[in-house]
Image: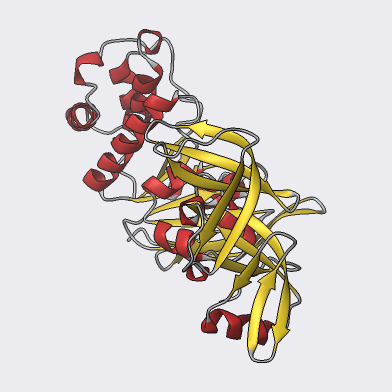
Amino acid sequence: MASISLRNVAKFYGDVQVLFDCNLDIADHEFVVLVGPSGSGKTTLLRLISGLEHISSGDLYFGDRRVNDVDVGDRDIAMVFQNYGLYPHMSVYDNMAFGLKRRKVPKAEIDKRVRGAAEMLNMAAYLERRPRQLSGGQRQRVALGRAIVREPAVFLLDEPLSNLDAHLRVQMRAEILRVHRAVTATAVYVTHDQIEAMTMGDRIVVMSEGRIQQVGTPDELYDSPANRFVASFIGTPAMGFLSCRVERKDDTVNLASDSVTIRLQPDQARSVSRSGVERISVGIRPERLSLGEDKAADWTVRGIVDVVEMLGSEQYVHFGVDGGTLTARVSRDHPVKVQQTVLFSGAAEHLHLFDEATGRALS
């Protein structure tokens, strides 16, 4: 059993608290990604799970076993780091076999595991090479293979693809997922790259300033962010925001700024009324903005184009509104120029509403 549970886990370095009341349940065989900006606490949380750092308060369980005071060597884990950590004077075979030799695993079993992992990682032809004779992607495969041969209950991966170029990262993402399916171990993966998180995780844990902001599937985080931070962090390009005041008249509730008036749907109006807030941060995904005026739209907004990013079949148009910036995804069939005045429209049902003071989503 390789399920992992954290109960009110906190971490202090002296008088400085870096993790606050972290609660998380990871199911057996699940692939969970910890994501957040630098300093969010994701690597510290991974190191607490591994046993490389001591838990200041709270409880950590592997299955039904409390492991707060269990040594890292007795937790049945294997780690893969950003730094490959390969021995330069050893062959690929010996690098992968090293940990098993130290545990005095029989030679026949070592050979079976190493060659099996090498086949899985398409490295069988490179077993006699030294690390300096390998590409970055091949070195990362060796580091991954060294973890696989351990046959651990839990894989912990700390930004393992950060040193690779964009093309290799895409390749290795697919490789790691294929390996995870083959070995059926529980995996906890740390990254600052939300594209990695969205494409790899069964579930994603979004962290900021030492706190878990939201846990959910990629779809849940994208469609129903719990707060403005999650909304802005998940999605490429990032969600844009408009600061609006709440206007109540008779039985209607609208949102308005200097450039836009938004006619809310009944369920949205009820949520805003129940909240009692006076200012709303309105989140808009780039794909929810339609170029040009639509008579049936719930709102329109006009702005001046700041930047146009050409991406082949489509372009991302960044335009200024009310002192901020929104981004729209536009087909190449509609060329847009910098400094051009543009008009976009949209449906209220696709908007995300947040309390401007607290950042909390209004459901």
Residue 136 place in picture, x, y as percent: 41, 19
Q: From the viewer's perspective, is residue 330 above or below residue 272?
A: above
Q: From the viewer's perspective, is residue 1 above or below residue 161?
A: below
How many circles with numbers are drawn on the protein?
0
Residue at 26% x, 11% y: name it. 128
Q: How is the image coloured?
A: secondary structure
Location of the C terminus by quadrant is bottom right
Q: From the viewer's perspective, is residue 62 above or below residue 331?
A: below
Residue 18 place in picture, x, y as percent: 71, 52
Residue 165 place in picture, x, y as percent: 45, 23
Residue at 43% x, 17% y: name it. 87
Towards the viewer: 161 or 123: 161
Answer with left or right where residue 60 lies relative to residue 75. Answer: right
Answer with left or right where residue 340 lies relative to residue 265. Answer: right
> Does residue 246 appear in the picture of this structure?
yes
Residue at 65% x, 82% y: name it. 253
Residue 265 place in picture, x, y as percent: 53, 79
Q: From the viewer's perspective, is residue 263 above or below residue 83?
A: below
Towards the viewer: 296 or 75: 296
> Does residue 61 appear in the picture of this structure?
no
Q: Which quarter of the picture shows residue 97? A: top left
Towards the viewer: 256 or 15: 256
